[in-house]
Amino acid sequence: MNKPLEINLTQFEDLVEQKPMLILDFWAEWCSPCKSFSPIFDQLAELNQDICFAKVNVDKESELAEAFQVRSIPTVIAFKAGEIIYESPGVPPAKVMEQIFSELRA
């Protein structure tokens, strides 16, 4: 089972170096849209096991959220070979997620 990792700044630095495809979900426990997106993100991780999925709790990891200038949550950021290929606040539509997966695998 491919569950998203709950990560901090140190783990992020390791993951972005080790994983060629990484998707981060910046979230908080008090955020209603984040709660709605969480099971979708979990399901996407399960369905796309070749991609590393990770979650960043902005309340616990404010330094990491600040590093990416996260101003609104949820915010999804996708990395390919350490480079950001997608970054957007809000819950991405399914079609957008499919495009991200295609770009990551290209």
Image: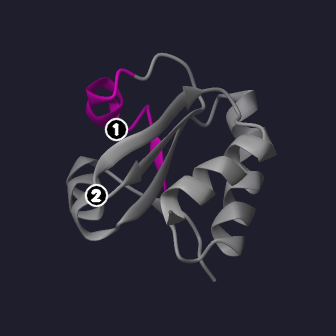
The answer, for residue 87, to whether it is visible in the render is: yes
Q: Give the x, y percent position of residue 24.
A: 48, 48
The label shown at residue 42 is none
- Where residue 32 sits: x, y (%)? 75, 29
Name the amino acid, label 1: Glu
> Relative to 17, is 105 on the left or the right?
right
Residue at 26%, 70% in the rendered image: 18
Q: Nearer the viewer, mark 2 or mark 1?
A: 2
Foreground: 51 or 67? 51
Answer yes or no: is residue 53 visible. no
The quadrant of the picture occupied by the N terminus is: bottom right
96 versus 69 height, above or below: below
Magenta-colored span: 54-69
Residue drawn 78% across the image and 38% down it: 93
Residue 55 lies, in percent from the top left, at 50, 51
Residue 16, disc: 2
Residue 11 sits in quarter:
bottom left
In the image: residue 90, left or right of residue 82: right
